[in-house]
Amino acid sequence: MKKLMTFTLMIMISICVLNAQQEIKLYKNGPAESNGIKKHESMLRSDFVINIRNPRMYFYPAAKEKSIGSSVLICPGGGYVGVSVIKEGEEIAKWFNDLGVTAFVLYYRMPNGHSDIPLKDAQTALMIIKKGAKEWNLDEHKIGVMGFSAGGHLASTVGTHFTKNNRPDFMILAYPVITMNKKLTHTGSRENLIGKDPNEKLVKFYSSELHVEKNTPPTFMVVATDDDVVPVENSYMFYKALQAKNVPAEIHTFPKGGHGFGMRKRGLEVDNWPDFLKKWLQTNKLIN
């Protein structure tokens, strides 16, 4: 069974490399620190990669005739256990490509008791994109971050804990985990990131709503109010925090959609959210 799973994973990764054309390692000689995971990376279901120890991103370049230089780092969700690399990765990257936006799908390491590791990987990926902007014909002032669910938490952490060298220019958050407040968070994401009994310092550091400032990037958000996995209050509190600091922000809520809807059509009103995102990208001059 293990051999079969490994073989399947190799096939899926090969497909990703083929479609994306390029795999970019975040650390050429491997990461300096270990997340302590000993098991081999493997695939659950058809698109959920677990036990990630070797962080990387896959490059989906936009066609030159469509591109105006915008790019986005995509952080798939997975409760800080793994990453949903197709529904919240490759499919999203291809949607952006159709709009002329270059995309990078991030395979970040799981924390496994090391809460700083996912953030380090995402920040490193963002810096790689910024440094490679000229080579890839990207506008260094139009590099954003997007995340889904726990990947949305990672993206929001990137957008609220940054330096001059790794600040994203915009954020897109889909049904995100935002807070580590025990009463409102997604329990699995919280425990996998900061442990079952974290100290208050960790709780506050990873509660993104507490770190919004006036220079937090402009943000687009989407969520379904019937989300039974991540309380919708996560999105609301972050939106209110953005408003309080006069950060340009837009939130779209839908009555039905649940959690993890991605961009797949199901005959629901929430299916239309990519149209709102497209308009937002146009308004912010990220696409034509």
Image (tube, rainbow, N blue to C red):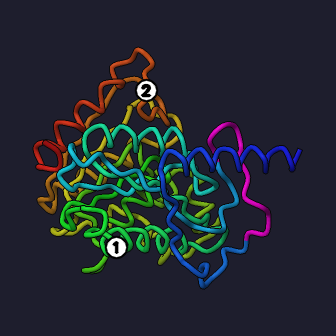
Alpha carbon separation for disc pair 2 and 1: 30 Å
Q: Tag 2, which secondary structure?
A: loop
Q: Determine the residue positioned at 17% across, 51% down.
A: 68
Q: In this view, does 83 lie above or below 92?
A: below
Q: Residue flagged by tag 1: what amino acid is it?
A: His
Q: In this view, does 265 lie above or below 96?
A: above
Report the magenta residues as a range: 37-48
Q: Nearer the viewer, residue 87 or 194?
A: 87
Q: Give the percent coordinates (x, y) of residue 50.
A: 68, 54
Q: Give the percent coordinates (x, y) of residue 242.
A: 21, 57
Q: Determine the residue positioned at 57% across, 55% down.
A: 189
Q: Determine the residue positioned at 48% across, 43% down.
A: 90
Mark 2 and mark 1 residues within 8 Å of each other at the beta carbon = no
Q: Give the percent coordinates (x, y) of residue 78.
A: 57, 49
Q: Residue flagged by tag 2: what amino acid is it?
A: Gly
Say whether residue 152 is magenta: no
Q: In this view, does 220 lie above or below 225?
A: below
Residue 72 placement, left or right of 142: right
Name the residue that disc number 1 marks.
161
Indicate the quadrant containing the C terminus: top left, top right, bottom left or bottom right.
top left
| Residue reaching furthest to the bottom | 32
Mark 2, other Cα within 10 Å: few <14 / some 14–19 / many ≥20: many
Q: Quadrant of residue 190?
A: bottom right
Q: Which is nearer the N-term, disc 2 or disc 1?
A: 1
Name the residue that disc number 2 marks.
257
